[in-house]
Amino acid sequence: MDAEALGPKLAKSFPKGTVLFREGEPGGEMFIILAGEVKVAKQVGNLERILAVLGPGEFIGEMAILTGEPRSATATITEDARLVPIDAAMLEQIVVRSPEVAVRLLKRLAFRLKAANDLAAILLHRDARVRVVRGLALLVETRGEERDEDVVFVELSADELAAQLGLTVGEVSEVLGRLERGGMVTPAPGEHGYLVRDLDRLREFVDFITARETLGELG
């Protein structure tokens, strides 16, 4: 979605730490991110589960104005941001006047729905190793930043990955350690995240674990 075309004059500034909206609140606006970063998280028991971290060009909060239901998650500004607020009437006008925007919106919604379904499938798996590896693979697809050939940077700490996957930090750190020793994943020097160096091997690792579990159940 071309955020600039919607009028930078409508943009508002939000400092880091601002809670844009909270889970369970009614929602009358969506937002397009012009600059900065927004974390989307959901409370599961006593844990905060990070669903996404969104940056410039992304939009947030659209489901509440499309369905009329309360906010399904909490959005917090994690880097000083400039956002364009859009209410239901404005969104309708934009969609009517610009079919291209409507198509982009639908594609983005479909992509997010697929990512949510993939995450749900990951959370149902019993093996922490599979959760971590599949979680990393999903993050590469949804939030990865390509650095070199076959090297993708994912901005996420072990703590945040643990919260997102419903695991303890110890479980995640143990799996990441094994992946590091195998040369598949390494901490990004001086950055808040990891470099995924061999996604194909990660997926092969998942297939191996899954196959072993299946054979065990059959036995």
Image: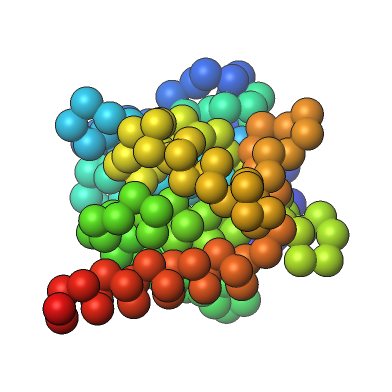
Left or right: 175 with respect to 15?
A: left
Q: Position of residue 161 (x, y in %)?
A: 46, 40
Position of residue 40 relative to residue 153, above or below, is above
- Give the image location of residue 158, x and y in percent: 50, 35
The answer to whether any part of residue 88 appears in the image is no
Comparing 71 with 94, the one in front is: 71
Q: Is residue 140 left or right of residue 191?
A: left
Left or right, 184 with reference to 65 = right
- Mark count: 0
Looking at the image, is 12 positioned above or below residue 128?
above
* Residue 11, position as x, y percentages in the image: 65, 36
**Is residue 123 visible to us here?**
yes
Residue toward you, 32 or 181: 181
Please state, as top left, top right, bottom left or bottom right, where the N terminus lies in the image: bottom right
| Residue reaching furthest to the front | 219
Please name the colour scheme applied to the rendered image.
Answer: rainbow
Residue at point 63%, 54% (across, down): 182
Q: Position of residue 103 (x, y in %)?
A: 54, 77
83 horizontally vs 23: left or right? right
| Residue shown at the point (15%, 78%) measured from the top left | 219
- The quarter of the picture where residue 149 lies is bottom right
Q: Residue at x 32, y 39 (%)?
A: 167
At x 43%, y 74%, the residue is: 207
